[in-house]
Structure formats: C-alpha cells, structure tokens
Amino acid sequence: MKSLILGYLFLLCFVTNPGVAQEIELVVTIDRQQAPDLPKNATDDLKSSLENFVNNKRWTEDNFSPQERIKCNMLLTLTTGSILGRYISIAQIQFVRPIYGTTYESILLTFLDKNFDFEFALGQPLDYNENIYISNIVSMMSYYSYIALALDYDSFSKLGGSPYIEKAFNLANIAQQAGPPALNVKNGWELGEFNNRMALIVNLNNQLFIPFREGLYIYHRKAMDTFKDNPEDARQTIIVVLKSLKTIRQQVAISVVSSSFFLAKKQELIQVFSKANQETKTEVLNLLREIDALNSEAYNAIMKN
C-alpha cells in the first residue's frame, strides 16, 4: 500500500499525525481578467466547489495521513463566462511531489488543457459516478484526480499508478462517448488529437510509454530522493531516464506526455545539472537539445554556472 511506502519516506521529516485524510490537496486559482463582468461570487463558488469536490472525496482504498496528500495546483483562466453558467477556459494543472528529506517539491507533470469548457451554476452540487457521464466539469475534475494518483503512485513504486491510469482511461472513454460537442468546437475528449486530455491518457495507457512511467520512479525515487546525499550519482541516474525518453521519441516524434514532462522539469533539470562537472554538462545538454528541442535555448543555462 502507498501509505506504507510514504510513511517510511516521511517518518524522519514530519511529526506523526494519527488522522486519516483524503488523498488529494487541490488548490484552484481563477484568473477572471478576461471575463470582468462575471460576478465574483460566481467564481468564488466555482473555486470552492472544485476544491471541495476533489479534496473531500475518497479516490482510493488506501489510507493517507495529511502529510501524504498529493498536491495539485490548477490555474483556471476564464476566457468567457456568462451569468447562465457557461464557461470557456484554459486550465494549467501541476502535479507536485515532495522530495524525501528536504523541503523541496518537484513538479511531476504540467499539463495545459486548452479546452477546459463546462457549465456550472451557482451552488450546483458536484457528484461523481465512475460508470456514468454526469457533466463535463465532473468528468474533467475526476479525470485529473486519477491522473494525479497515477503519476504519484508511479513515482513511488514502479508502475504503481496502473489502477488509476485504467480508471482515467475508462472515464475518458465514457466522456468521449457521451455526445459530440457543438459543431467545430473541441471539448478535449476527441480521439486523434496529440495534445488534449484524451491524448494524455492514451499515451499513459500505451505500452510504448512504459519506459516513461518507469522513468518517473527512477527519476524521483532513485535520483531526486537521494540527490542531497549523492548528487553525482543522482545526475547519472537522471541521464539514464533521459536516454529512455530519447528512445520513446524515436518511436513517437510528438507526444503530450513528453512535452508536459519537460514543461514541468525544464527549470529543475537546469538547476540539477548546472553544478555538474563539464563532461556531464556537455552530455546532458546534447541529450536535452535532441529530445526537447523546443527548450534547447533555455538549456544553455546549464553551461553558464
């Protein structure tokens, strides 16, 4: 059980709390600058409803202490909102993991959802049934809860998140089949896209991406959790993970999993390798330029320290 694994990891870091908490700690920030006419009480109610729905629900059968809760940050940018409760928005979701023996928190993945559109009325209750489509907002928030669990469990035990990938995959299929979106409007559940919600879970559920999921464990448990005691070994372990991602890229040139991983890890990788020896810096810089060409200029900072 995850509680046993995490309990060991946090034993030296936190005072034991006998209470049992839900699994996820979601913080929602709403940017309403593009929808200034939307009443503030509506967005305040939306924020609290989303947080309460995710944070107060039991998503697994495992027991979590308050210190073990999985942190998620959601920035919800409303591009359109109406008093009728129809919202068009963009969501950026970060899934966060603590690093053992430190106060540092590592971002597992940063996903940009450009089709976070939904209907929500003031005071509307949010209920979830894993076998039934109720509403898009319920499906999206439940989906991201399972993604959070999948990534977190994968980072603490090899392929430990498999049950939650299966749940997210089933949820996405139910949402996709619930009904077509309005004409020429994407809702994020479409098959065949490369950077939407469906693409993310299709990637995670694909055998080709098993090395990525195993890499989450190696990167975080074998490298980052040991970095303060042996930074050079940790750096070499991360390079092994990056090489496995290179292998995936050779088979799948563009993937939302890869782009979301490097969106989360770019600055961390720069910090980790900026104090490496020159040989390691050169090796990782060449590797990163090849597998994350979009951020190749940013990685030059590795050589400047």
Image (cartoon, rainbow, N blue to C red):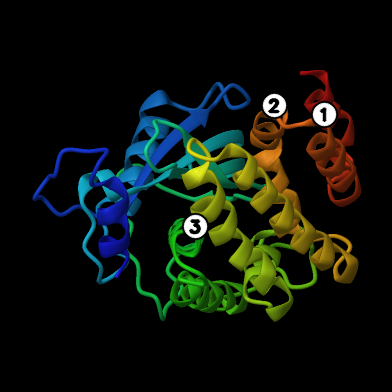
* The image quarter in which residue 47 lies: top left
Looking at marks 2 and 3 on the same chain, the residue that comes earlier in the sequence is marked by 3
Looking at marks 1 and 3 on the same chain, the residue that comes earlier in the sequence is marked by 3
Inspect the image, locate mark 3, and give the three-letter code of the amino acid beneath it: Tyr
The residue beneath circle 1 is 298
* The image quarter in which residue 191 lies: bottom right
- x, y percent for residue 40: 41, 24
Give the label, 1 or 3, closer to the camera.
Answer: 1
Tell whether 207 sits left or right of 298. left
Say which of 295 and 236 sits in front: 236
Whether residue 202 is visible, yes or no, is no
Callout 2–callout 1 Cβ contact below 8 Å: no
* The image quarter in which residue 71 lies: top left
Looking at marks 2 and 1 on the same chain, the residue that comes earlier in the sequence is marked by 2
Whether residue 102 is visible, yes or no, is yes
Q: Which residue is at 51% across, 78% downward? A: 166
Report how many numbered discs are placed on residues in the image: 3
The residue beneath circle 2 is 275
The residue beneath circle 3 is 144
Q: Which residue is at 27% across, 59% downward? A: 57
Report the residue that reaches farthest toward the top: 305
Up/down of 89 relative to 171, above or below = above
Inspect the image, locate mark 1, and give the three-letter code of the amino acid beneath it: Ala
